Amino acid sequence: MSLRPVKSIIQAKPTLEGAGVHLRRAFGFGNTSDFDPFLLLDDFRNDVPADYLAGFPWHPHRGIETITYVLAGEVAHGDSIGNSGVISAGDVQWMTAGSGIIHQEMPKGDAQGKMHGFQLWANLPASLKMTDPRYQEVKAKDVPVVTDDDGTSVRIVCGNFRGTRGPVDGIAADPIYLDVSVPPHKKKALAVETTRHAFAYVFAGSGRFSNASGPRPVATEQMDGATIYNSPEADNRSLILFDSGDEVTVQAGEEGIRFLLVSGQPLKEPVAWYGPIVMNTPEQLRQAFDELEKGTFLRK
């Protein structure tokens, strides 16, 4: 196995989105080529209802897929093709915007007013930019969990993990999206295919992701005869971008660690992006906004 070095550790930044929702953005907009095929990851965690209840009123998408994963509270949604519903704690919604959709997402806290979830954007390849929109909505009970003898648990939102496949399928980027919990002081190795881009996002506890060639080593150890350099500690709201390799290793801290581990095959295509619309060329982007203005944006 070849260990994936830690390329960088970044703290998610406070951001306002929608009608004034306070959230943290791990990455998004600007140059996101290191994360290809992913474009954006938002952590919408908040205990103050006034900071999230305004939600994300009606807005368009084209050329991408949005993945919403709720941990606390709920999100009511509706769209221009007649879909509506509510996703609650542990539920997943995967929306393929394709040729175009207009929708809204309105968060509501739990009994204590807490709201927590993530939204990840995945790019669509040029051949599928104008595919028909569709939804996949998965309830918490249908998301499989793999639990190891050491207490490590992995919820499989999407993709294949050790022979168990998540419920979301038919996604262009062929992503693997895992919610990983490692108990205090335990060390865990997780396989990631070499050809994929991969990142982790810590949202509880802390730990160190082993780093074969990190720029700021803080400790060393021997593993299979090789010297491994550990990266600086990654804690709550830390985004870890990995370099190439086929294995990620984490050493959990005093309180354990919980993180998203996401990987996908890079598209390596040009990106023309403005707000919620992502195309391949500036001409396609201009056309999309012209259609919005003329009322011809929706194809379905």
Image (tube, rainbow, N blue to C red):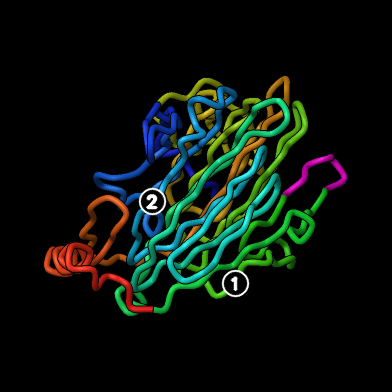
For residue 35, the mark is 2
Among the 4 quarters of the image, the one containing residue 85 = bottom right
What residue is drawn where x is 54% and y is 54%? 77
* Residue 210: image location, x then y, percent: 56, 35
Label the magenta part by its dominant secondary structure: loop
**Disc 1 target residue:** 169
**Along the line of sight, the residue nearer the viewer: 185 or 261:** 261
* Residue 55: image location, x then y, percent: 47, 40
Horizontally, residue 177 falls left or right of residue 194, namely: right
Horizontally, residue 196 falls left or right of residue 269, namely: right
Determine whether 73 is above or below 133 in the image: above
User: Is-magenta flag for residue 153?
Assistant: yes
Residue density around tag 1, few if under 14, some if 14–19, many if 20 or more, within 10 Å: few
What residue is drawn where x is 12% and y is 68%? 283
* Residue 162: image location, x then y, percent: 72, 62
Instruction: For mark 2, give the secondary structure.
Output: helix
What residue is drawn where x is 33% and y is 66%? 63
Determine whether 75 is above or below 277 in the image: above
Magenta-colored span: 148-154
Horizontally, residue 264 falls left or right of residue 28, namely: right
Q: Which of marks 2 and 1 is nearer the N terminus?
A: 2
Label 2 to label 1, Cα distance in Å?
21 Å
Determine whether 267 is above or below 32 in the image: below
Disc 2 marks which amino acid? Answer: Phe
Q: Pick the quarter of the image with the C terminus.
A: bottom left
What residue is drawn where x is 55% and y is 41%? 107
